[in-house]
Amino acid sequence: MIVKMSKWATPEQIAAVETKLHEWGYKTGKMVGEEITLIGVYGDISRLPTGEIREMGGVDALIPISRAYKRAAQKGEPGRLIHKTVRIGDMEVGGDALTVIAGPCSVESEAQIMEAARMVKAAGAKVLRGGVVKYRSSPYSGWEGIGSGSVEALRHGLKLIVKAGKEFELPTVVEVLDPHDVAIYEDMGVDCLQVGEPNSKNQALLNRLRETPLPVIHKRGNSLDIEAYLLWVERIMAEGKENVILCERGIVSPNRYTRNTLDLGGIAALYYQLSCLPIAIDASHGTGIRDLVHPMTLAGIMAGASVVLVEAHPNPLVAKSDGFQGLFPEQLTRLVTACERVWELRRCLEPLYIPSALLERQYETRVAADRTRFFGVT
């Protein structure tokens, strides 16, 4: 990392930054130009208290020498961020419109997924989701999905959700667990593949997804910090794939009331600083409590998400998996309406956001005067 000092930085301020870095155990190298000084920082910068360095006098910016996640990284500048769009079927995701992806945790039968698709369409959501093979950490956890028994069963389950999607003109999103099954999902007409939390670091699966033309929603692993997560996303994109959507679905924390802890700050960091990719919020898995899905989804939109993933069932009380977090049809309808209103509010408020980088230089010119004015020192 490079610490870029302001052109108005004093020798004392430059020395103070170097001293602080040395106290933390970092080696430094100084490059002095005609107007500015750059301080190279050597060591494990993942533990560097960047916030404290940014607040030190004379510091203009912290510049990563090179982000390892080059393709997923934000390529714009403060005030001119770059955000890509991704197509799911005929839907453009990540642009000027919010996209709600809804449906049951699992495809359970033809009648159930048809009713679910009707519910999703009536609520105003734009994409149908549903699992065909379910990840289970324990062999005793219960039902593993309508498509778990054989290749024929997998094809049958995929056929059901694709049929329901076509019937109600909804593109489909289905989670894939095995790299060897990707071709089957493509052949059966699925519109988008989802990588669930348990497979967020499945190297073989992520490598295989480089080759598919289908868009991929990659859910953050619940133990991954933001930059480690982006490195796993980068694995999918490494050979040129662009159509990837990020998804925050909760991380592990001391909190035990909710199923996971939604990292809203992580969503904001991804949107405003770190990545150019569309971001989804999944409050169903993030909370595991259906009555908390509504408020936390809205919070995720305000933080920077442009895609909503939500579980809903024609009757969650009879669902074969995760019924406790699935919304009732009436809840889904109201959530979609609320999401649209919050999206419009965010679009109205967004011009009021101003990144610090656009202000820091003008305030740097006032540092000496303000120190005298506020503290009586020069």
Image (cartoon, rainbow, N blue to C red):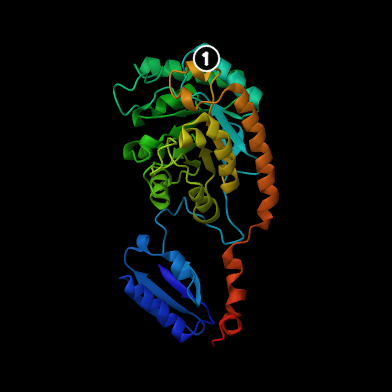
Other-residue count near label 1 (Cα within 10 Å), few / some / many at <14 / 14–19 / ≥20: many
Q: Is residue 259 left or right of residue 345?
A: left
| Rendering quarter of residue 20 | bottom left
Tell me the residue at 45%/86% (across/down). 11
Looking at the image, the residue that sits furthest to the bottom is 378
Residue under label 1: 112
- Expressed as whole percent of the image width and height from the top left, the position of residue 135 reads 36, 27
Tell me the residue at 56%/19% (across/down). 116
Q: Is residue 59 left or right of residue 118?
A: left
Mark 1: secondary structure: helix
Tell me the residue at 50%/81% (across/down). 9
In the picture, which quadrant includes the C terminus?
Answer: bottom right
Q: Is residue 87 above or below residue 273?
A: above
Looking at the image, the residue that sits furthest to the top is 111
- Expressed as whole percent of the image width and height from the top left, the position of residue 79 reads 61, 60
Tell me the residue at 45%/46% (across/down). 240
| Rendering quarter of residue 353 | bottom right
